[in-house]
């Protein structure tokens, strides 16, 4: 469940701090190893991508054992490992790659190729890079095992591309874009998937840039940022109405969100702001001012291409992949067919360490991309203080009709694994 829910995840950081969610901390001590060696992982799942055992990510060789381990400090399941190295953002014929290239075009045209572009940085980063370097407070919800994939207590799968800001500033880059796959534990519905793609932008100013304007550095950067991003929104969406919302991010002050009015709704496009001075100072840039932004590519691609379900981005079905071509932004997706969903309910008595994200991980571990939504439909506490919850699971394939038999087997496996891994009592 995202902290502040809007469309497609990207709002995890827009709350000041602390564990707003019940049980968020519990994930630490009670985290469940979902790793490969557990005996139940032997069934064949035809719809999954093959799991490669050695990968090269941004010049780093990664073995499966480096990422997935049967150890309580590791919560990376096989399904997540299998997404490493897929890099949808580097495919020129894929909606995510097409959108990335369209944003590159905007920056190249308006800043005469001044922005350095990174789209192959390793997604395995330290907690220092992912959190400390961008001033995420020690008690922030995003640091919990319930929200982030930990490889070990000091290493995570990046949960945002902001993880690379400090390092690139330290290396002396002053204008840059970072695109990459990011990973978050979350609930399941048509706009949330545990792997998605973000683009980060940073621009650094020198005192000479703002002094002549008569403005202070912060106001100058904020104004420049807004102009730049309004131009980007017009480049992608055409002549749309826009509004700026004041918000909070740990890494920027002031912080804003840009919304556009598109298809009769206000749509959150991105988060941004003037970089906290401390980040610049630590990167050896004491006299500078900078702006930064981060945007979720799936969120934008879903509306630009009319893609109704976030799982489709991962589809290898030719009826999906053949609809997109290099450089063609916003060609509307034609659904090839809508197969019927099948709903199954399950109720259980939860325990102290139960979280919806843990439940969703187990369900995805069994059903993969055949699960469309997991929704809490009933919740009550009895006189003895025991809490029962009922979840409705929607199974639906994007590519074919599922048989009753297949769904019953999935549901049976889900029930069994929810019981054994989450230690809840089924009703
Ligand atoms: N990292 C933020 C997120 O994932 C997005 C973001 C917001 C990035 C503001 C930024 C920024 O660089 O300035 O929710």
Image (tube, rainbow, N blue to C red):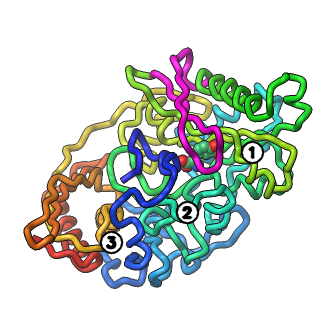
Name the front one of labels 2 and 3. 2
> In the image, which disc is placed on residue 44?
3
Residue 299 magenta-highlighted: no
The location of residue 321, given as percent across then percent down, is 47, 42
Quarter of the image holding residue 57? bottom right
CB within 8 Å, label 3 to label 1: no
The location of residue 295, given as percent across then percent down, is 57, 41
> In the image, which disc is placed on residue 257?
none
Which residue is rendered at x = 15% and y = 71% of the image? 386
Name the front one of labels 3 and 1. 1
**Residue underneath mark 1:** 117
Residue 260 magenta-highlighted: yes
- Mark sitting earlier along the chain (2/1): 2
> Distance between the Cα atoms at labels 3 and 1?
39 Å
Q: Quick check: 133 above or below 292?
A: below
- Mark sitting earlier along the chain (2/3): 3
Question: Which one is nearer the viewer's eye here, 204 or 393?
Answer: 204
* Number of other residues with Cα within 10 Å of mark 2, as a class: few under 14, some 14 to 19, many 20 or more: many
Q: Quick check: 14 above or below 47?
A: above
CB within 8 Å, label 2 to label 1: no
> Distance between the Cα atoms at labels 2 and 3?
20 Å
SS type, badge 2: loop
Quarter of the image holding residue 24? bottom left
Question: Which one is nearer the viewer's eye here, 84 or 91?
Answer: 84
Which residue is rendered at x = 41% and y = 31% of the image? 306
**Residue underneath mark 2:** 84
* Stretch of the chain drawn in magenta: 235-261
Q: Quick check: 393 above or below 174?
A: below
């Amino acid at each position: 469940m995202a902290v502040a829910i809007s469309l497609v995840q990207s709002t995890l950081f827009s709350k000041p701090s602390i564990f707003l969610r019940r049980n968020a901390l519990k994930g630490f001590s009670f985290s469940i190893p979902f790793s490969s060696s557990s005996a139940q992982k032997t069934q064949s799942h035809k719809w999954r991508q093959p799991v490669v055992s050695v990968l090269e990510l941004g010049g780093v060789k990664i073995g499966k054992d480096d990422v997935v381990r049967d150890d309580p400090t590791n919560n990376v399941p096989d399904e997540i490992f299998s997404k490493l190295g897929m890099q949808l953002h580097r495919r020129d014929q894929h909606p995510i790659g097409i959108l990335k290239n369209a944003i590159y075009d905007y920056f190249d045209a308006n800043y005469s190729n001044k922005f350095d572009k990174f789209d192959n940085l390793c997604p395995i980063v330290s907690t220092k890079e992912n959190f400390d370097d961008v001033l995420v407070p020690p008690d922030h919800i995003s640091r919990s095992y319930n929200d982030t994939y930990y490889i070990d207590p000091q290493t995570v799968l990046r949960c945002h591309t902001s993880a690379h800001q400090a390092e690139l500033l330290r290396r002396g880059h002053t204008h840059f874009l970072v695109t990459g796959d990011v990973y978050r534990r979350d609930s399941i519905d048509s706009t949330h998937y545990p792997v998605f793609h973000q683009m980060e932008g940073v621009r650094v100013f020198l005192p000479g840039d703002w002094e002549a304007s008569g403005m202070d550095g912060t106001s100058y950067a904020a104004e420049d940022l807004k102009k730049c991003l309004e131009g980007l929104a017009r480049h992608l969406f055409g002549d749309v109405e826009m509004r700026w919302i004041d918000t909070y991010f740990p890494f920027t002050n002031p912080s804003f969100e840009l919304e556009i009015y598109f298809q009769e709704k206000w749509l959150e496009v991105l988060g941004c702001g003037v970089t906290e001075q401390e980040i610049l100072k630590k990167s050896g840039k004491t006299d500078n001012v900078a702006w930064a932004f981060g945007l979720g590519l799936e969120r934008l691609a879903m509306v630009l291409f009319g893609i109704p379900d976030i799982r489709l981005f991962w589809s290898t079905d030719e009826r999906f992949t053949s609809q997109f071509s290099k450089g063609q932004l916003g060609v509307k997706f034609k659904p090839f067919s809508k197969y019927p969903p099948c709903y199954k309910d399950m109720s259980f008595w939860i325990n102290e360490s139960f979280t919806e994200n843990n439940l969703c991980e187990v369900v995805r571990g069994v059903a993969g991309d055949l699960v469309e939504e997991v929704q809490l439909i009933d919740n009550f506490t009895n006189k003895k203080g025991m809490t029962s919850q009922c979840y409705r699971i929607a199974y639906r394939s994007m590519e074919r009709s599922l048989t009753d038999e297949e769904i019953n087997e999935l549901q049976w496996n889900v029930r069994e694994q929810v019981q054994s891994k989450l230690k809840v009592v089924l009703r």
